[in-house]
Image (cartoon, rainbow, N blue to C red):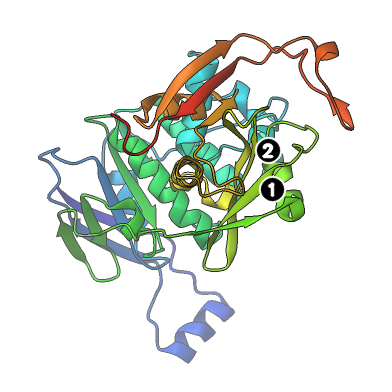
Amino acid sequence: MKIDIHHQCTDHDSYRAARIKSLFNVEQGANVHITADLPIEDNDWQIGVIVGGSGTGKTSIGKKLWRGTSIHNPKWDKTKPIIDQIAVDGSIDDATACLSAVGLGTVPAWLRPYHVLSNGEQFRANLARALADEPERLIIDEFSSVVDRQIACIGANAFAKSWRRTKGKQAVLLTCHYDVLDWLQPDWVYDTSKNEFIRGRLWQRPSITFEIYQTNWQFWHLFEPHHYLKMPLMIAATNYVAVVDGELVAHLAVSTRPGLIEARACRLVVMPEWQGAGIGMRFLNQVCEHWLNAENRYNKPLRTIFHTSHPNLATALRRNPKWTQISGQLHGGRASRALTAGGKYGGHFRAVQGFRYLGADYD
């Protein structure tokens, strides 16, 4: 695919324009010529990236890629929460799946209009809309340009994994940031600054390693705003946090059922900027494995049960061979039966699903 673009405007002759031409020895700025050779007609790819500095022609090339395919620019209604504007012709599970797939798993954010979200949340919401709309061909301009680089990289990784599941659909991302390439692992890259085309998945996603520390509720106030339930603290719980390079990224609390029959885990939270990196499930599994191996304050091997009403977390647990589903309720129990210190639980209409950790070596 050969692209030839010629932009032209009036060659202004005002005093300031003439002065600038004289000062910098520039004859004119009215003509811009951009050429690019992109051998992508074979369609044997899913993700391509056009990267380069500002003003090097990324957007112009993007507009000329496919006739009839414009740059993705979703419109958002300020009077509706984003959950009502994603997968509008599908089910609520379709909408939450798209949001979770791109790492926007903070439930309170789903209930806000787009314009009040943070830059990082808006970035992921736009990606969720792109997944939900399921276009055969997708072009996104200024990909990750206005967000923190941590959010950009994790969000890029989450989007790439989800887009590759679409099978046969193609996306071209236009960006001035080279740091997302390793996380996207694109099938091809065209660098407008170097006029260079590279084919083949030559980029490798950096590995994310984390350390687990046992603690108490002292860090919960940092995670609580991102948890979808407001409940009293668990009594006699052991808390764990996952840390990446000194940064708190995830939290989990574990207590026991009466008689030390089983452990019970809850309050799993992954910080928004790390959602979509796959840390949550790995963290949960490792803590549960510790308890199964008697690495707890009771020195007793205990299987762990875990309940959630988050539809996409439940889906992930069902897919994981280390877990088995043990229950599924359409609503909670009567609130009057379950009083706790400082509050009560039950009496809700959440679809709560329960799972038991079987272990890494379960046969």
Crowding at mark 1 (Cα within 10 Å: few <14, some 14-19, many 20+): some
Task: Note whether 180 is above or below 221 in the view shown.
Answer: below
Label 1 to label 2: alpha-carbon separation: 7 Å
Task: Note whether 56 is above or below 320 in the view shown.
Answer: below
Residue 261 occupies which quadrant of the picture? top right
Report which residue position mark 2 lands on.
227
Q: Position of residue 174 (x, y in %)?
A: 37, 53
Residue drawn where x is 76% and y is 50% of the image: 221
Report which residue position mark 1 lands on.
223
Check disc 1 and report its element: helix, strand or loop: helix
Query: Does 234 sit left or right of 1 as displayed?
Result: right
Residue drawn where x is 39% and y is 36% of the image: 359
Query: Does 180 sit left or right of 222 as displayed?
Result: left
Would you say the residues marked 1 and 2 are in contact, meaning their CB atoms lie under 8 Å apart? yes
Query: Does 346 sit left or right of 47 as displayed?
Result: right
Residue 161 occupies which quadrant of the picture? top left
Toward the viewer: 260 or 342? 260
